Image (cartoon, helix red, strand yellow):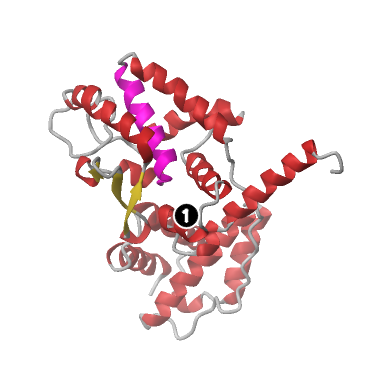
Amino acid sequence: MELSAATESFVEHLARVRRLSAATVRAYRSDLVDLHAATGEADLRDIGLEELRDWLWRASQRGDARSTIARRTAAVRTFFAWAVEEGLVPHDPTVRLVTPKKPQTLPAVATADGVRDMLDELAARAAEGDVRALRDHAILEILYGAGVRVSELCGLDVADVDRDRATMRVLGKGSKERVVPFGAPGLRALNAYLVRSRPVLQARAESTSPALFLGTRGARIGSRTVYGIVSRELGPVLGERTVGPHALRHSAATHLIDGGADLRAVQELLGHASLGTTQIYTHVSSERLSAVYRTAHPRA
């Protein structure tokens, strides 16, 4: 089977059988299309270890980041493992393919005081009754209070929220559901949005949407809009021009651990499949502690 045809079958398997997110499926397809560009319309059986090494070498020569090359290595590993299971190739050529190590980078984290001041300022603007400020305040309170991903926030419906318990049901990676709390400030902001803002936004749409958060035209809000909101409000706090919603998730996790939260509880809240993913926030906390020590202790 030719690589392009196998790629289409593979991404369909990822979407329908493994039920991966659309973004993850697009990433796999993109990596395999890049391999196709390097090898031409080759048959799967003609792609061996040397061809794969040459592909990754070309990527490094054109300046691709090590993280990108590592992701592509992981993509072809998964692809050829599937091809072996399907009987498309007799053996897996990626067995001896070396994965470059990703550089260890710590996520951007705002201080608790910085986040509080930002949310207080936005709450003051929302109190004046501005429809967008009410919505944006609720969005940021939920992103920080519940530590949810932007895709999870955009996928929320009104029916997913239990306001009596201040919890919400989110659909995470791999279509795994979890129930997360979002705190009293988040509940107040959400109640204000549902009463004073969402009905106004809903009235602008031609049809009723079940979505919790709506865009200015009354349809379900998109991730790009949320990115813009976070970048505008949180960017000045971190001193960066562009900041994504994950910065609030990172900040929430770090502040929980700083406050003594159990690592397993944080893992469950964030919906991490592996505890190792959650452990990066212990490194963030230790880095922050070291910075404070260096600036404050006379023996530092």
User: As shown in the figure, which amino acid type bears the numbered disc 1?
Assistant: Val
Question: Total label count?
Answer: 1
Task: Give coordinates of residue 258: x percent, y percent.
Answer: 58, 47
Q: Is residue 146 left or right of residue 74?
A: left
Q: Is residue 219 left or right of residue 147?
A: left
Where is residue 88, by image quadrant? bottom left
Q: Is residue 98 left or right of residue 6?
A: right
Where is residue 43, by image quadrant? bottom left
For the point 41% across and 53% down, which residue is it?
A: 269
Binning the other alpha carbons within 10 Å of mark 1 as few (below 14), some (14 to 19) or many (20 upward) gives many
For the point 27% across and 64% down, which residue is it?
A: 16
Residue nearer the viewer, 124 or 85: 124
Whether 70 is drawn above or below 227: the answer is below
Whether 3 is drawn above or below 155: the answer is below
Residue 98 in view, yes or no: yes
Work out which residue is located at the far bottom of the displayed protein and give it: 90
For the point 48% across and 62% down, which residue is it?
A: 36
Q: Is residue 87 left or right of residue 57?
A: left
Task: Give coordinates of residue 260: x percent, y percent.
Answer: 55, 51
Work out which residue is located at the far top of the displayed protein and give it: 128
Q: Which residues are magenta?
A: 130-148
**Is residue 94 part of the magenta span, yes or no?**
no
Residue indicated by mark 1: 266
Task: Give coordinates of residue 182: x percent, y percent.
Answer: 36, 42
Predominant secondary structure in magenta?
A: helix
Whether 129 is drawn above or below 268: the answer is above
Residue 39 in view, yes or no: no
**Is residue 136 part of the magenta span, yes or no?**
yes
Whether 146 is drawn above or below 86: the answer is above
Task: Give coordinates of residue 234: x percent, y percent.
Answer: 51, 30
